[in-house]
Image (cartoon, rainbow, N blue to C red):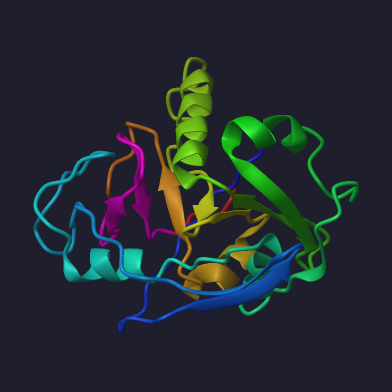
Amino acid sequence: MRTRFRLAAVVGAAALVLTVTGCEGDDDSTSTSTATSASASASDSGEGSARNGGASGGPGVRQKMMLDNMPEAKTVMAAGEYLQRFTTCERYSIDPSDERYYPMDEKFDLSWGVQFRGTCDDGGGTWMRVFKTSDMTQFQTAYKADLAEEMKDDELADVEGGFAIGKDFVVIAPDGETLRDLSASGLLELNCNPNFQVRGDVSTAPALVDGCVLTDEFVEPE
């Protein structure tokens, strides 16, 4: 899971109800994202801390909207179909032997709570990777621990954020154009670097793991 790119989502002015459908194995389900009750740091409502993981008071309007609008896929096929609404996601595959998978991913599946993986061409000669999680808290915990190891050599590792996440799936976007395409998807960027500081009108919301936050800021890969 060491190949990550920076991504987060811009939230619209009105609350959206995002429905993601799909089937995979014996799971033929339709899911509507529901409201998430949590405390949030509210940079646009005068609440919260400027450092990663800080939170005080209840969520502001924008923070609640961020959490409410995070998509839920239920299956990895549904996650791919959802991405196709916003991006050039061609030849979507869930075949474990697909050569477009990053070779190390499979080694991390169990410890990171990954059930299934998907991948598709982004139209620019690279590809997106999708991870369907069985336990998003486990995924975030594993990412935080992995980042802590990286920070022993580079304290600013992933300081602009790591994975783009929904309620139950995770996306790695390969380039800036794909990031822009995903800007209205409701996905949020997971940031677990304690050196991260909120800038400008960036909004944050609580992640599932202490010391991590979700942001709506898009930063293109360097």
User: Which region shows up in magenta?
Assistant: 199-217
Q: In this rendering, does residue 158 appear at all?
A: no
In percent of width and height, residue 50 lies at 20, 44
**Badge count:** 0
201 lies above or below 132: below
Residue 77 position (above or below residue 53):
below
* Residue that protrudes farthest toward the front in the picture: 26
Q: Residue at x 33, y 38 (%)?
A: 196
Residue 47 picture location, percent across and down: 10, 54
Residue 142 belongs to the span the image colors magenta: no
Rendering coords of residue 1 (x, y %):
65, 35
| Frontmost residue, 54 versus 140 | 140
Does residue 212 appear to the left or right of 114 in the view shown?
A: left
Nearer to me, 2 or 17: 17
Q: Is residue 192 visible?
A: yes
The quarter of the picture where residue 9 lies is bottom left
Quarter of the view holding residue 20: bottom right
- Magenta: main secondary structure: loop
Is residue 205 in the magenta section?
yes
Q: Could you tell whether 183 is left or right of 90 in the image?
A: left
In the rendered image of this protein, does residue 55 appear above or below residue 120? above
Q: Residue at x 73, y 51 (%)?
A: 117
Residue at (30, 59) in percent of width and height: 202
Which residue does the image show at 52% across and 54% down from the upper left? 164
List x then y, in percent, for residue 185: 51, 72
Residue 83 as seen in the image, left or right of residue 187: right
